[in-house]
Amino acid sequence: MSQTVFATPFIGREEELARLSGVLERARAGESRAVLIAGDAGVGKTRTLDEVAARAARSGMTVLTGHCVDLGDVGLPYLPFTEILGLLAADERYAAVLAAHPLVDRLLGAGTEADAAGSAARSGSGEGRLRLFEGMAALLADLSDVTPLLLVLEDLHWADQSSRDLLRFLLSRGFLQRPAGNGSGHRLAVLASYRADDLHRRHPLRPLLAELVRLPAVDRLELRPLADPEVARLLRALEDRPLPDATVRRIVERAEGNAFYAEELLAATDTEAGGMPSGLADLLLIRVEQLPDTAQQVLRTAAVAGRRVDHDLLRDAVGLPEDELESALREAVGHQLLVAGDDGAYAFRHALAREAVYADLLPGERSRMHGAFAALLTGRGHRAETAAERAHHYRESHDPGEALAASLEAADHARRVGAPAEELRHLEALLDLWESVPATALPSGEGSDRVTLMLRASAAAAHAGEAHRAVSLTRAALAGVGQDADSELAARVRYTLAGTLLHVDSLTAAFAYSSEALAMIPADPPSPTWVWAAATHVLAARQVGDSETALRVARAALRAAEHLELTDARADLLVSLANLEGDGRRSAEGRARLVQARELARHGGNAPVEMRALFTLAIGAYEAGNPEECLPWLAEGLDRARRAGLLSSPYPLEMRYLQLLVLYTLGRWDACLRTAATDLAVLPASGGFAAGPALYVGLARGDEGVADRARALLEGRFDWMAALVAGIVLTDAAALSGDAEAAVARLRSSVEALTDDAGTLPDVTVRLTALALTAVADAAAEARRGGDEAAAARWAAVATELLEPARSVALRGATGVPQGPEGRAWLARAEAEWAGAATGPDPAAWERTVAAFGYGDAYELARCRLRYAQALLAAGRREDAAAEARAARETAVRLGAAPLRERADDLVRRGRLGDTGATAPGGPVALTAREQDVLRLLALGRSNRQIGEELFISGKTASVHVSHILAKLSAASRTEAVAIAYRERLLAPELDASG
């Protein structure tokens, strides 16, 4: 009946909601079901139940919710069922049903004192208890004849014995198993939740759950922690202000998918300096304090060790006899605070439980125990695998010298095993300790000075996908370079800073620093530092459009690298020259240089340069119109990145995007989605753009949530590739919805955001323009049909204004080289749409566009063939139009692109082009499931806004669906559409009576 109102949107749980919605649907049809919903405290059980209850209420079900409450050993009998009956008694609609079941009045305390006394005596006997249970089952069964019911029982782990017994009866012998008199089942569903982390071995609910899940009509659903991206979305939804990425990542990591923990941690960000909120700590410590003293001592010691601790190390640190230790561990495991691993180690079930226990230690106690662990680990030898643990314990026991040495050892180990994120963490810890360590205890030897270690940390950050952190660390290194510093070190810092700035698209600043670096050291005699400074300057010069300087410096640097036998520098410069000379990386000469570069980098052992060569080979093949040829290069590049531990570095991230783009282009959409799902699980926070082509698939298949996911890419710090992906999705989405104003606005804002410091327009301008012009051409055509020549002229002028920059970019390219087959195809489409906006559909322009997309883009080819069919139909070439529409529809069906298939069917019907596999003229009209939902609400007289509210879509989207329905039914108005729908039996006759 009444439900909690939540201020935040419901996020995630799509699979669970779909399953529970299926239970509701079956219950409404007369198949009673029950679901036991398990989950840890705070994971979102109540929020999920409330969402399901809201959906049930909207579908016409009556929702009754009863809560179990923790009252210790003395519970109130039948408490959740009493609450449910109280709700029913307060609702006059069910007075007649309640009056027919006076036996149940006992649970409400009704009736005369004599009745109550007699009832109490009878309830003490088995017969009275059975009559009560049967009466409750009969009441619910009769209620389900009046209205479909959803019974929600929350927090079963606190249920009293009587409530557990009544629930057992209802599910095993009551309404779930007994059909109604008419032969169908009861229209009733039961959802009952409990905390899985509260069920220790002796918990009284455990045997009941084991019994209930064996019943055929009872299912169990475990609410697992939310995925990290869902927690991030929740955090951003909770805050009106933008949240720093670092804050979001920190909370996501600590919350481990628990929504309540995430909300509490977010609330404490401004007040507790990143610590744990006191209320959350108290909640977690309550369960710890229920343990015996020895078990609490073991937990405190384990908390100092970390999230996980080996049995032998814990034993030595805690100093208890083996039997006492095992008894204490059994208590901690039984209360689900610790989890025993197969390898003999123990881990805290949730990291925040460990944090709460750790924070509760006294400062001196904490320092002493860290010192004990450090001594124990050091006594076992200086193994690289334990360096990180030793560094941590030394740091927390206030021994900075030993902590710094162990941190450097740990960073070296992380680099050897290809773990840049961990290397970065240890190097940053080392740098934090630097000032507190005596000069005699600082590391010595080549590469161990503070500035060089900062540069190393910057490289680790870049390899870990933390581009902005890499910039910050390199700037710190620059600040640490004194006036008397070695010129080669000063130059190295500057060209490293230039390289990191290129990765965050700060191109002008990158060029300035690379210029400074190159000027600091002489070119003759050549030195390795000058060669690498020159290689970086080549990259920066090319990015700011100074191709002449880039080519000149690259050639000089390549000669120097060959003279000095710098294999990896030669490889890097060959890649740059492949991009700069002649027709660039698309040409046979460019590819030959790139293959040579790949071999040199491989022999030199330089994984980043090898990956750059492989990425450039792949993107060159794509730009040359050979998408299939990209895949082997990408597979090789990603495999090399995986073996080097560099999957989060810039080039592998772009390889992931390109791999998905190729799968999308070739029409292998299911493979694209599978690969994207795998990638998303491992991508760094800054790499979300790499899954962009999966959004292109979703949009083409009619996924209404794609636009929101694209907008999420624009949150936080600006990222060039994320802005590119979002621009493509949102421009196309606006065009597909027929909103020309929005499409043009999104095109302009995207191009503005993607234009570099030198004012160079991005290559994607051509694609964005073609997408936006689709809506512009349609708007101009609609204005002409309506006789509004002024509006048609205005849209024609807009089309001309948009086309000119696209022509310029396509013919020149962002790097001075004309675009390849893909760019030319998008320009052809833009030209065809411009012609449509200016004078009307031009079959010749669309014929050229179809031919241009023949290089391999399956979806765009199909979309253009449909536009070509429209132009042919307008020109009276019906047979040719039918052939093009048929081809477009066949591709749409193969790809699962339902919106495109529907537009093809609509063109065939309106143009009477004959059977293309769609509904023939005069036959039954084919509406999508969503259009059928909209049509039903149209028949009830709902406005577009009301339709949107009931179907959880925007009013604008509802308007688009209404327009599609009118077109498919050839109706001039909403009223006529409803009349035609009744005539064609698309609406059930009884719907009119109920309206």
Image (tube, helix red, strand yellow):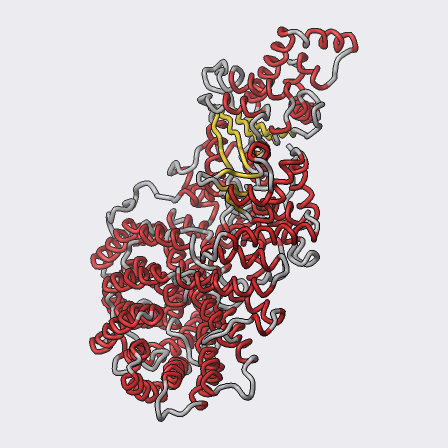
- Relative to 379, does residue 877 appear above or below in the rendering? below
Residue 57, visible in the rendered structure? no
Q: Quadrant of the N terminus?
A: top right
Q: Residue drawn 44% across and 33% down? A: 988
Residue 160, visible in the rendered structure? yes
Left or right of 655: which side holds 347?
Answer: right
Badge count: 0
Q: Where is residue 154 shown, x and y percent of the image?
A: 61, 31
Q: In which quarter of the view is residue 586 placed?
A: bottom left
Q: Where is residue 204 shown, x and y percent of the image?
A: 59, 23
Q: Nearer the viewer, residue 114 or 292?
A: 292
Q: Nearer the viewer, residue 206 or 230?
A: 206
Q: In which quarter of the view is residue 570 placed?
A: bottom left
Q: Residue drawn 50% across and 40% down? A: 224
Q: Where is residue 418 shown, x and y percent of the image?
A: 40, 61
Left or right of 210: which side holds 417?
Answer: left
- Relative to 881, does residue 433 appear above or below in the rendering? below
Left or right of 874: which side holds 967?
Answer: right
Q: Nearer the viewer, residue 709 or 313?
A: 313
Q: Where is residue 882 shown, x and y percent of the image?
A: 23, 55
Among all residues in the image, which is located at the extreme front?
379
Left or right of 856: which side holds 434?
Answer: right
- Relative to 106, does residue 939 appear above or below in the rendering? below
- Relative to 628, does residue 489 appear above or below in the rendering? below
Q: Nearer the viewer, residue 164 or 840?
A: 164
Among all residues in the image, which is located at the extreme right?
113
Q: Quadrant of the C terminus?
A: top right
